[in-house]
Image (cartoon, rainbow, N blue to C red):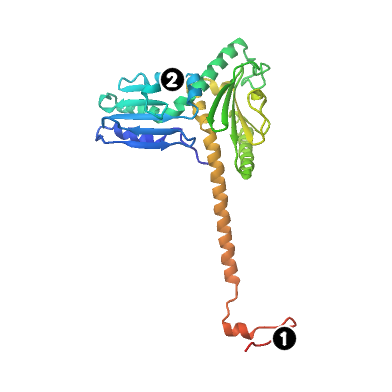
Amino acid sequence: MLHLEPQNLLIQETFAKALAANYEPCSLDRILTDFDFTTYHISTPQDKTKILLSINIKCWQDLVNYGAMALLEKKYGGYTFIQFLSGSNCEPGYDVSLYIDIEQVQLNDEEKSLLVHELSLLKRNCFAAPFLKAFARYEVLAKENPVDPNNLYGEDSVAASNSNEEVLKLDYRGQETIYIKPSSDRVTVIFSTIFNDETDKIFSKVFLQEFSDARKRSIQKAPQVINSHREVPLEIRHLAPQTDDKTYITFVLFPRHLASDDVKWNTITQIELFRSYFHYHIKIVKCYLHQRMRYRVQSFTKILNRAKREIDEEEYRAERKTASGRRFEVR
């Protein structure tokens, strides 16, 4: 099964070349679009040695409300050669920009590699803000309502999710939304998605059932995955109206998925990609099935062509018969 990379490979390639020792400055003007319609713009608006990286995200205002600006300042503010632009100062048509002076970069190879990696994860870093806020709230609730130590993973804890706890909401594309709800023993992440094709719903059920089966068979530490079509999950029933065209996919993150900072960031990286990963693989499955069907039709056509008797016109005319079996020849 193919895995989508969390980093943008074109941004990674561009800045890897720009920060190389033998880089020759050149004019750049590249617009990139990601799977979820996130748009990037890499350009050199004034000087070839100064690169402007801008990003536009559909749910940017929601991310700002949950602390995205502070997180980006923390990620990139420590570099003296990066100017952080936002609001009216950033590139028109984009939400935030990073202005990087290549000539001022004084880093070793390992530090350059780390910087390139962080720049390529700009979208992930933006989306991390609401997840980190939910994880921090979970830690507070876990201290106030500690889980039974005999319950190692907290899956059967009686300290269920708090009904009055704030649900973080991201309208990340069109009519689709991400809901994040912290509680004392888990963090629940719910994706709402829409399938325009009825066959996609069937593929989605098979695909998500494999998530559940894999967890039962071998990957028991994976998050619990719950799929519900039309029925709104209880955690967000007061926020999401009942509709017939939406599917809700629930991930239950237990304490083992939030055990350390590295684990938290890995959890964010994987779950933030889920919607793109999910629909991408449904399209790949349909493409594979169509290829197999075309191949099978071609195979049957070849068999029929080999079985077809080829006769010339004279033989065809000589072999004509009536319904009773009598032969005749047309003159």
Q: Residue at x 40, y 33 (%)?
A: 40
Q: CA distance from mark 2 to mark 1?
A: 92 Å
Relative to residue 288, is residue 35 depicted above or below?
above
Placement of the C terminus among the 4 image quadrants: bottom right
The spot of residue 241 in percent (x, y) is: 65, 28
- In the drawing, what numbered circle is on residue 47? none
Relative to residue 286, is residue 21 depicted above or below?
above
Residue that mark 1 sits on: 326
Seen from the viewer's position, the closer of residues 46 and 103 is: 46
Q: Residue at x 63, y 34 (%)?
A: 247
Which-is-in-front pick, marks 2 and 1? 2
Total number of numbered labels? 2
Relative to residue 160, is residue 37 depicted above or below?
below
Labels 2 and 1 touching (C-beta < 8 A): no
The spot of residue 284 in percent (x, y) is: 53, 45
Residue at far top of view: 144
Q: Identify the amino acid type marked 1.
A: Arg
Residue at far bottom of view: 331
Q: Identify the amino acid type marked 2.
A: Met
The quadrant holding residue 253 is top right
Q: Residue at x 57, y 77 (%)?
A: 310
- Assess disc 2: are there few (<14), some (14-19) or many (≥20) residues with their C-alpha within 10 Å of its C-alpha: some
The spot of residue 31 in percent (x, y) is: 38, 37
The spot of residue 207 in percent (x, y) is: 61, 39
Residue that mark 2 sits on: 69
Seen from the viewer's position, the closer of residues 47 and 309 is: 47
- Secondary structure state at the residue bearing disc 2: helix
Does residue 260 appear in this view?
no
- Assess disc 1: are there few (<14), some (14-19) or many (≥20) residues with their C-alpha within 10 Å of its C-alpha: few
- Secondary structure state at the residue bearing disc 1: loop
